[in-house]
Structure formats: structure tokens, C-alpha cells
Image (spheres, grey):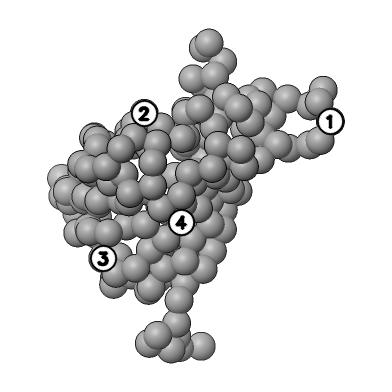
Amino acid sequence: MAEEPNSKWEGKACVEVPNTNTEQAWRLLEDFCNLHRLMPLETCYQVEGIPGQPGLVRYCAATVKGGGEGETTFMWANEKLLALDPIQHCLTYEIVENNIGFKSYVATVKVLPISSDVDVQGCKIEWSFVSDPVEGWAFQDLISYIDSTLHYMANKIQQACSAN
């Protein structure tokens, strides 16, 4: 089925982080300008705004190995924090500038308990998004990217929390 030109892409990925409670994971995720500690990025830093406040803009960049032998692509994005809720353990951001092909992209990342049972150790991270179709990507490419990135982040969070 062909997509309508004005249709939005919407999706969600979720991953469990065993032996890491909600507060531990949230402390790492709420640090909006240190995403390079959790994702395979070369850099992530504050461009403007006040840390922890909506309006904060971060610059993220990475060199990605491409399809050809030795081929690499430098990818970057400026992302703006729209909302940060330490009680609900969630944040919402949008990509405001990039060279990746995003025209409109807004995502929400939430940290949720796995269970209401206080004896159960673990949390889950949910990443949902709404986006215009991305030039050169299929919808499934974006879902796959978010899912693999979320699993990478979960492993980094678990490692960081078990080291403490």
C-alpha cells in the first residue's frame, strides 16, 4: 500500500532493563546533553538553553560506516527538549536541524517500572515517536534503528548501574 504524501509515521519501541530500578535509569536519561554516554555518538553537548529546562538544545553527531568498503557518513542533529517530567520519568524532544533527512520528528522517552511488586528489580524504557516520512528511509528502517538504539542504551544503562 502506498503512503499518502502527508501521512505521519508513528511508532514505539520498548526494552526491559533488568536489575536496574526506574530512578537509576532515569538519572542517566534525564541528563539530556550527555547522550553520548548511552548511544554510539562521538559527541553530544549543549548548544543553548538551561540544563534540565524545556528549550534546551543539544548537538549530537556520529560518523557512521556505510555500505561501501571504507565508506563513512558524518551525521548530526540539533535536538530541542520540549518537556522533562522527573515525576513521570519521561522527556519529549524534537529534531530541529539535521543532515539525516528528518523534516519533522518528535519523540518521547519514558522509564517505567516492570512491575508494581517492590521485590521485582528492573524497569523498562519506552521510546515513541511521530515523524514525517524520512527521505531515503522506509518506515521499517526507522523502527529498526530506534529498536537497536534502545537496546544499545539499555545495555549501557545496565552496565553503568551495576558498576555503582
**Image quadrant where residue 122 sits:** top right
How many callouts does the rendering have?
4
Amino acid type at image mark 2? Arg
Q: Secondary structure at mark 3?
A: loop
Please identify the residue farthest to the top as the structure is shown: 164
Residue drawn at (30%, 37%) of the image: 50
Q: Nearer the viewer, mark 4 or mark 2?
A: 4
| Cα distance between the residues tagged 4 and 2 | 19 Å
Q: Secondary structure at mark 2?
A: helix
Amino acid type at image mark 4? Ala
Q: Nearer the viewer, mark 1 or mark 2?
A: 1
Does the rendering let one see residue 34?
Answer: yes
Choose the circle earlier in sequence order: 3 or 1.
3
**Image quadrant where residue 68 sits:** bottom left
Residue drawn at (47%, 28%) of the image: 28
Looking at the picture, tell me which residue is in the foreground, 66 or 26.
Answer: 26
Does the rendering let one see residue 18?
Answer: no
Q: Which residue is mark 2?
A: 37
| Cα distance between the residues tagged 3 and 1 | 43 Å
- The x, y position of residue 117, in whole percent, is 84, 30
Amino acid type at image mark 3? Gly
| Cα distance between the residues tagged 4 and 3 | 16 Å
- The x, y position of residue 14, in whole percent, is 60, 48
Residue drawn at (61%, 38%) of the image: 87
Q: Are marks 2 and 3 in contact (CB under 8 Å)?
A: no
Q: Which residue is mark 3?
A: 101
Choose the circle earlier in sequence order: 4 or 2.
2
Q: Which residue is mark 4?
A: 107
What mark, if any, has residue 117 been given in the picture? 1
| Cα distance between the residues tagged 1 and 4 | 29 Å
Amino acid type at image mark 1? Asp
- The x, y position of residue 34, in whole percent, is 34, 31
